[in-house]
Amino acid sequence: MIAPTRLLLLRHGEVEDSYHRVFGGRIDMNLSPRGHEQARALALWVSRRPVDAIYVSPMRRAQQTLVPFTNHCPTPPSTRTELREVDFGDWTGLTWEQVRARYKVSAFHWLEQIESGAIPNAESGAEFREHPGQTVAVICHGGVIRVLLSILLDLPLRQMSVFEIDYASLTSIEHHAHKNEITLLNFAPWRDLP
C-alpha cells in the first residue's frame, strides 16, 4: 500500500491591527505581536511530526510566520510566488464596510465574487506533486488555502466560505490514490494564548 501524501496548509499569523477586516490581498503587511506568538505556537505543534518540505509565500506575513519553522525541516524552505495572497483588484485596501458601500456586495461573499470574476481588476477563479508519501507544509494565506481546498475537494470556490481559516491555523489533507481526505480543519494551537 502506498503511503498518502500529507499536505499541511498553514495560514500566516495575525496581521497588524490596521489591516483587520480589510481586503489586504497583495499588500505586504507585517504580523502583529500576537501573530508572532501564534506562529511560534503553530511551529511548536507542527514540529512534533516530521515535515519533509516547506513551501512558503514570498509575502512578509508568511515569511515572518516561517521563521520559527526553520529549525524543523530537513531541507531549506522554498519560497513560491504562486502562493501569494489572492489579488483583490479594486477591493485591495478597502474595509468590509467600504466594499458594501461602494459595490453593494457583502464582503462575506468574496469567494463568489472571485470565482465569477466580478471584482474589478482582481484575479478570477479560472487563473488559479511532488512529494509522494511525504509530509509537505505550505505557509500561505486564507484565500490561497480556500483555493487549494476547492481544487483538492473538487468543489466550487464559493462553497469554501463554509470553512473558517483562522490566523495561524492548520488544515491537513491526505492525498490518496483515489481521494483527498481532510484530516484536520482550522486547528489553531495558539487558542489558549492570553
Image (cartoon, rainbow, N blue to C red):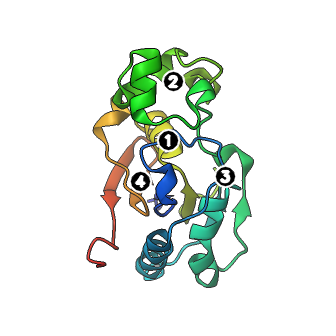
Q: Nearer the viewer, residue 81 or 96?
A: 96
| Tags 2 and 1 touching, CB below 8 Å | yes
Does residue 18 appear anywhere in the picture?
A: yes
Q: What is the CA distance from the residue labelled 4 to the residue labelled 2?
A: 24 Å
Badge 2 local density, few (<14 within 10 Å), some, or many (20+)? Answer: many
| Tags 4 and 1 touching, CB below 8 Å | no
Label 1: which secondary element = helix
Q: What is the CA distance from the residue labelled 2 to the residue labelled 3?
A: 20 Å
The label nearer to you, 3 versus 1, is 3
**Quadrant in the picture for the C terminus:** bottom left
Label 4: which secondary element = strand
Q: Which residue is mark 4?
A: 173
Answer with left or right where residue 3 lies relative to residue 159. right
Badge 3 local density, few (<14 within 10 Å), some, or many (20+)? Answer: few
Q: What is the CA distance from the residue labelled 2 to the residue labelled 1?
A: 10 Å
Q: Nearer the viewer, residue 70 or 133?
A: 70
Whether residue 64 is situated above or below residue 8 in the rendered picture = below
